[in-house]
Amino acid sequence: MYPFFEANKSGDQNFFSSKILENFSFPPHLHPYVEIAYVIEGSIEVTINDTPCCLKAGEVSICFPNDIHTFNSDGFSKIILFIFSPDLTRSFFGIRMDKTLENPFMSKNIVDDGISSLLYMLHDEYTSSNNKYVIKGLLYTILGKLDSHFTFKKSSTFYNSTMQNLLKYIEIHYHEKISLDSIAKDLGFSKFYLSRIFSNKIGYQFNDYINRLRINKAQKLLSETELPVTVIALECGFESQRNFNRIFKELTALTPTKFRTGI
């Protein structure tokens, strides 16, 4: 489940979240926030702007705003995922807003140099006191210690236009009845061009991507609300509860009810 970014929260200057997630997977997506993933146990494949890396325990990935990234856990993984507005550390990101990282992955020997302890402290602060000044101070300290390992590059024009517009559009309209035809018409691209982007860049067929996104949104609602399953199915863009139940079980090996109860 990807419980943090929602399109209507885009641009929240004080946004910060930290959660521990197990066996986390999510298809390619983007948001206007910085994202740091720290692997506690196991391994997880992270892809950032077409660069894949299998992260193991003690390693870190860093996404800059609007980097396109994906997570995939084939086996067991346990991570801490931090997502925060670059405005929280404006002095660091203000001069780097059109940049991204040449290598967004940090090895264990780099992270072991005091950074892992700071990441645990940051998570503990958020889940206990949630003092915004302490959180800002820890973020600046972490970024400051990582800065000597960063090599910056200009963000790709492709990622700043076509892919971003496509994924942003889907993030806003995923609960509606959308198709490649309707997206192509609204964005001014050909259907076949968008189909190639899904196959070659995103790595999923269009319908598979939409289903995975909708199921993730449904997991969030099942976990955080008491809305009936029927209502959740409709709110996430499924035409019937039967179809919702079938796809939910295909992708999670659980029914929505069993997911909600934890049985």
Image: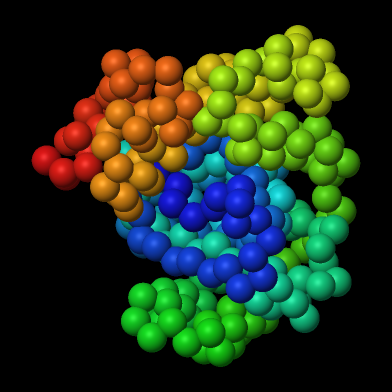
Query: At which x and y percent is residue 224?
Result: 32, 52
How was this image coloured? rainbow
Q: Is residue 75 left or right of residue 215?
A: left
Query: At which x and y percent is residue 20?
Result: 36, 61
Quadrant containing the N terminus in the rendered view? top left
Occupied quadrant, residue 138 = bottom right
Occupied quadrant, residue 65 = bottom right
Residue lying at 79% horizontally and 17% vertically, measured from the top left: 185
Residue situated in front as seen by the camera: 129 or 172: 172
- Say whether residue 54 is visible: yes
Residue lying at 29% horizontally and 16% vertically, measured from the top left: 242
Residue lying at 72% horizontally and 32% vertically, measured from the top left: 166
Q: Is residue 224 left or right of residue 70?
A: left
- Say whether residue 106 is visible: no
Residue lying at 82% horizontally and 67% vertically, measured from the top left: 96
8 shown above or below 166: below
Q: Is residue 174 left or right of residue 160?
A: left
Query: At which x and y percent is residue 86?
Result: 69, 69
Number of numbered discs: 0
Query: At which x and y percent is residue 247?
Result: 35, 20
Residue situated in front as seen by the camera: 180 or 40: 180
Quadrant containing the C terminus in the rendered view? top left
Q: Residue furthest left?
A: 263
156 shown above or below 91: above
Residue situated in front as seen by the camera: 252 or 71: 252
